[in-house]
Amino acid sequence: MTWEAQFKEIFGIKWPKLLESLGQTAYMLGLALLIGAVIGLGLALLMVLCRKDGLHPNKAVYAVVNVYVNIVRSMPFIITLVFVFPLTRLIVGKTYGSTAMLVPLVIYISPYLARLMENSLLEVSHGVIEAALAMGATTWQIILRFLLPEALPSMVLAMTTGTVGLLGATAMAGYVGGGGVGDLALTYGYQRYNFPLLILTVIILILFVQLLQLLGNRISGKMRQHR
């Protein structure tokens, strides 16, 4: 008996099916994280710049962004997923599949990353900002040359935390036909009482988390050493 046949006998699926599910999870995780990080950084910068002691205080803008971030962060992903079904259908044309899941995943993760990035940006010493202002730097120069470089190591750790949370959301997306490891665990594992496959998917997710955390810690550590 070949190892492929042994794999199917133990886990109840063919080897390519596992690879397909891993690819779907990586696709959702990578693209949602990229888009969510860009949106999250924009929201974080708005909150930092427009807060009372920011470079451009604006109570209205800060209040709107802050309330939006708090509201979305307080909603469990499964509720967010169902709530934005009409928007998902409008943008993608359907509410199932890995691509459709990107819409709720981005909406879910961007405010979460925004709050983490805001905390990282607020950790930057006011002395750095004051020195930049004394040199006549513009707002964009302060952001690009002073604020972001100083906050980057902390932001990498924030991104790592957000990525781990997003991985859990991608697994949950399988509950509504999003594909990936979560769909594999539910459809081929839980519903068919296939406990070896359930254990395998749990091990895969644990390894994902460990690798992501290790990578994030390593990158952040190297950045702090070269500052």
Image (cartoon, rainbow, N blue to C red):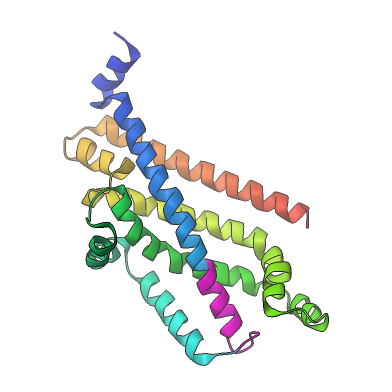
Quadrant (top left, top right, bottom left, bottom right) of the N terminus:
top left
- Quick check: 35 above or below 75? above
The residue shown at (43%, 52%) is: 31
How far from the left and from the top, in percent, is residue 68? Answer: 40, 78
How far from the left and from the top, in percent, is residue 192? Answer: 16, 35
Q: Is residue 49 magenta?
A: yes
191 relative to 168 in the view: left or right: left
Quadrant (top left, top right, bottom left, bottom right) of the C terminus:
bottom right
The residue shown at (25%, 27%) is: 13
The answer to which quarter of the image holds residue 201 is top left
Seen from this angle, which residue lies furthest right? 135
How far from the left and from the top, in percent, is residue 191? Answer: 17, 40
Q: Nearer the viewer, residue 135 or 105?
A: 135
- Quick check: 130 above or below 14? below
* Count of residue discs: 0
How far from the left and from the top, in percent, is residue 111? Answer: 44, 69
Q: Is residue 82 magenta?
A: no
The answer to which quarter of the image holds residue 156 is bottom right
218 relative to 101 in the view: left or right: right
- Quick check: 16 above or below 142? above
Our reading of the magenta stretch's main secondary structure is: helix
Q: Which residues are magenta?
A: 41-56
- Quick check: 132 above or below 209? below
34 relative to 218 in the view: left or right: left
Q: Nearer the viewer, residue 193 or 132?
A: 132
The residue shown at (31%, 48%) is: 98
The residue shown at (59%, 45%) is: 215
